[in-house]
Amino acid sequence: MTVLVTGARGRVAGALLALLHSAGIPARATSKNPDLLSPPGGLPAVRCDLADPSTFDAALGQVDSVFLYAEATHIDAFIQRARAVGVKHVVLLSSSAVLAPDAAEHPIAGPHLAVERALEAAAARGDFEATLLRPGVFATNALQWAGPLRDGRPVELPYPHSYGDPIHELDIAESALAVLTEPRQRGTAHLLTGPESLDFTEQLAVIAEVTGRPAPYTAVTPAHWKASTSGYLPDALAGSLLAYWASHDAIPTPLSRTVEKLTGHPARTFAAWVADHANAFRD
């Protein structure tokens, strides 16, 4: 089995490549800028830009399985080329956001859902098997607080008590490895969550406890937060995040034990994730 790993500069893909290398499974790292990659063990790095179909054939040659990021722009072309070269299995890094009633219109969930539907249609035709990983809130989202906390400034929260289910990127990568290597786990959708439902204030308290540094916050209005992010967040995306946080305000997130089912161990706690990334929150 040779696994093509798209988006290899991402944290999940990077962790998956390390796991594949450790397991002795041939893998190929891809990015639209492969010169910036440093795959473990000298694994080959090739160009694959999911927004550029002309890069698909060279990347997919002699590949059995694909770990795919959810880029919907040319998903039909990607499926066509994957089928043509004999890919047997595609694992999609999707999102639990696809389960929302308005997912198709949502700027984050919509592209994930479009790719899911395209892969499911391909699997129904017999093109290849498709497995969907639907993680909830990435623990790495907390890195957006690292700058203010390093500078001794409070984090601005429009919904301090909005809940999430922070999941460690390594748990997602290990789940991906499981579905890539265990045939009985293929061909279905897996909802992945962390082991705890924590609101933003509780996450900051964990950061403070683990790092030994203050992690203060201040409550701000949604309008203030949106204005403060206008230089780097598109208006529609900022609005969607605010709507998501509002919908989870004071509402704990339901949890799954899928990580444990797939990997054989419980999902890592948010405190474990902070310990692994503690330097990001320190000077």
Image (cartoon, helix red, strand yellow):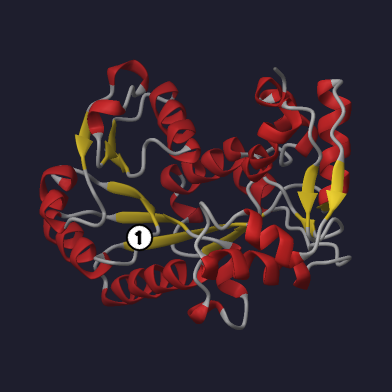
Front in this rendered view, residue 9 or 217? 217
Res. 87 visible in picture: yes
Locate residue 197 relative to residue 179 in the image: left or right. right
Image coordinates of residue 207 in percent, x first then y, are 81, 32
**Residue at x-position 53% and y-position 64%:** 189
Can you say which quadrant of the picture contains the C terminus? top right
Is residue 139 toward the left or the right of residue 17 in the image?
A: right
Find residue 167 and report its horizontal and vertical position in percent: 67, 45
Q: Quadrant of residue 220?
A: bottom right
Towards the viewer: 149 or 128: 149
User: What amino acid type is highlighted by mark number 1?
Assistant: Glu
Q: Residues within 10 Å of mark 1 (few under 14, many from 20)?
A: some
- The residue located at (18%, 62%) in the rendering is 83
Asked if residue 50 is positioned above or below residue 19 in the image, the reply reads: below
Q: Nearer the viewer, residue 235 or 67?
A: 235
Q: Residue at the location (71% across, 67% down)?
A: 223
In the rendering, at what x and y percent does residue 22 appear?
Answer: 44, 22
Which secondary structure, mark 1?
Answer: loop
The quadrant holding residue 135 is bottom right
Q: Residue at x 45, y 35 (%)?
A: 16
Look at the picture and state if 259 lies above or below 148. Answer: below
In this rendering, does residue 269 appear at all?
Answer: no
Quadrant location of the N terminus in the rendered image: top left
| Image height of 158 relative to 214, above or below | below
Q: Label 1: which residue?
A: 71
Q: In this rendered view, identify the residue nearer to me: 274 or 119.
A: 274
